[in-house]
Image: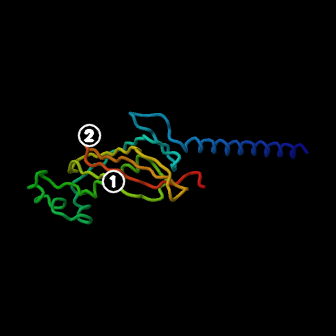
């Protein structure tokens, strides 16, 4: 009889511990669903979780790590996607005003996209809706260490999809001298956490 009481006690205690762990885990999940509010060097720190329309705040800014742009990367990308001599032929490019091959515009947009995605984490993107005001400001030259910044400049409800909202980011790519390389606005359709 004592063993049965002891077993019941242990089982009850175990259930309480497991229940508490489930509640604690859920509380931690709810807490990390939101953007961490502590700024570092003027930029928000993102938690590692999927972010929905409700999580994204106007004025948020993200800064990425760096990407080293090598001559070989410039040539390899351009050979496949934009095979112009200024991108793939160092001898030809040496005679241009830049004195070297330089990255294709589509290569620079791809780098900006990858860097920005790594900076802002997992966003519940339904679809990209477009790019506006694309400007190529200075060349992406071999040896550059590039980084991106993205700022939320607009956020609104979708007129055609009540389960999503539309967010616009100002995207910028800089070199190691903090000189702008490209700038554009990216518009995305972002899922809502609370669907209607």
Q: Which residue is mark 2?
A: 178
Q: Where's the N terminus, which quadrant? A: top right
Asked whether 131 or 101 is in front, the reply is 131
Query: In the rendered view, would you say 125 is above or below 26?
Result: below
The percent position of residue 104, horizontal first and vertical second, equals: 23, 57
| Residue count near mark 2 (Cα–Cα under 10 Å), binned few <14, some 14–19, many ≥20 | few
Residue sitting at 55 percent across and 42 percent down?
32
Please indicate whether residue 30 sits to the left or right of residue 129 in the image. right
Please indicate whether residue 8 sits to the left or right of residue 62 in the image. right
First reached walking from the N terminus: tag 1 or tag 2: 1
| Residue count near mark 1 (Cα–Cα under 10 Å), binned few <14, some 14–19, many ≥20 | few
The percent position of residue 49, horizontal first and vertical second, equals: 52, 48
Please indicate whether residue 65 sits to the left or right of residue 165 in the image. left
Task: Label 1: state its secondary structure.
Answer: strand
Per the rendering, the mark at residue 181 is none
The percent position of residue 10, horizontal first and vertical second, equals: 79, 43
Disc 1/disc 2 C-alpha distance (Å): 23 Å
Residue sitting at 79 percent across and 46 percent down?
11
Residue sitting at 36 percent across and 53 percent down?
113
Callout 1–callout 2 Cβ contact below 8 Å: no
Query: In the rendered view, would you say 5 is above or below 74?
Result: above
**Display coloring:** rainbow
Mark closer to the observer (1, 2): 1
Residue 64, by quadrant, is: top left
Q: Residue furthest left?
A: 95
Residue 85, by quadrant, is: bottom left
Asked whether 97 or 6 is in front, the reply is 97
Q: Which residue is mark 1?
A: 132
Asked whether 188 or 94 is in front, the reply is 188
Task: Label 2: state its secondary structure.
Answer: loop
């Amino acid at each position: 009889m004592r063993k049965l009481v002891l077993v019941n006690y242990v089982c009850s205690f175990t259930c309480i511990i497991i229940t508490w762990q489930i509640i604690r885990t859920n509380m931690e999940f709810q807490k990390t669903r939101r953007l961490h509010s502590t700024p570092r060097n003027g930029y928000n720190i993102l938690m590692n979780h999927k972010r929905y329309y409700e999580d994204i705040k106007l004025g948020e800014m993200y800064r990425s790590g760096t990407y080293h742009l090598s001559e070989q990367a410039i040539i390899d990308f351009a050979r496949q996607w934009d095979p112009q001599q200024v991108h793939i032929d160092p001898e030809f490019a040496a005679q241009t005003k830049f004195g070297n091959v330089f990255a294709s515009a589509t290569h620079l947009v791809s780098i900006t996209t990858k860097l920005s995605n790594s900076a802002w984490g997992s966003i519940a993107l339904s679809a990209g809706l477009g790019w506006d005001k694309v400007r190529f400001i200075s060349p992406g030259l071999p040896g550059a260490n590039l980084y991106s910044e993205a700022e939320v400049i607009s956020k609104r409800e979708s007129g055609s999809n009540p389960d999503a909202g539309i967010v616009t980011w100002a995207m910028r790519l800089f070199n190691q001298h903090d000189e702008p390389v490209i700038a554009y606005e990216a518009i995305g359709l972002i899922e809502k956490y609370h669907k209607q």
